[in-house]
Amino acid sequence: MLLDRLFKPRPSRESGRALYARVVEQSRTPAFYREMGAPDTVEGRFELYSLHVMLLLDRFKRQGDQAAETAQALFDTYLKALDHALREMGVGDLSVGKKMRKLGEAFFGRVKSYQEAFEALPATEGLQALLARTVYAEAADARPLEMAAYVVAQRAALAAQPLDALLAGKVDWKPL
């Protein structure tokens, strides 16, 4: 029917949602918190979610219109999840906008910093320093060297995955 086609979500939106669900699943892997020393706090989880979203956005760069559309859908889903989380934590409606603006600025700052760190690869000192400032900002048992190795391996694994599968919302994260 015509109405079904008009109101059916775009495939990229469904893929963005599926990819974000996989980001959340991967970011909640207990080994990040137990073995790699990431703080199991709101901020620590934000950093891990953001890191995995950035890895996917990096993979989609310069891959054409469908990849750009899927990347945007992933980012939009991420933002909606942040908004929802703030509201669940009891942040009032009047404050959500201000907090979302701060989180958005933090995210875009991290995107720029991660891109600079990725451009410096295979040297990982910059990536390690970035991870120490972000993921491990409040960690007593920081392991930025291990996390940097994970990020580099994950980035390579994503590059090896077929773009069509990723655009369909299927991502195979490299195990920790």
Image (cartoon, rainbow, N blue to C red):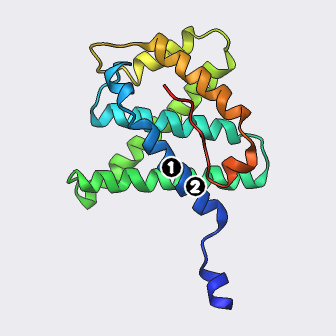
Between 60 and 35, the residue placed more toward the observer is: 35
Residue occupied by mark 1:
20
Residue 69: image location, x then y, percent: 68, 56
Three-letter amino acid code at disc 2? Gly
Residue 109 falls left or right of residue 42: right
Residue at point 53%, 57% (across, down): 17
Q: Secondary structure at mark 1?
A: helix
Residue at point 49%, 43% (across, down): 23
**Vertical position of residue 141 compared to residue 173: above or below:** above
Residue 86 falls left or right of residue 74: left
**Vertical position of residue 133 compared to residue 57: above or below:** above
Between 133 and 165, the residue placed more toward the observer is: 165
Residue 92: image location, x then y, percent: 22, 57
Badge 2 vs badge 1, beta-carbon distance below 8 Å: yes
Three-letter amino acid code at disc 1? Tyr
How far is mark 2 from mark 1, CA to CA?
6 Å
Between 139 and 31, the residue placed more toward the observer is: 31
Residue occupied by mark 2:
16
Query: For the view shown, which residue lies furthest in the front direction?
Result: 175
Assess disc 1: are there few (<14), some (14-19) or many (≥20) residues with their C-alpha within 10 Å of its C-alpha.
many
| Snapshot quadrant of residue 168 | bottom right
Between 68 and 15, the residue placed more toward the observer is: 15
Check residue 150 in the rendering and tell me which mark sits there, or answer none.
none
Residue 1 falls left or right of residue 100: right
Residue at point 43%, 56% (across, down): 80
Q: Secondary structure at mark 2?
A: helix
Query: For the view shown, which residue lies furthest in the left direction?
Result: 90
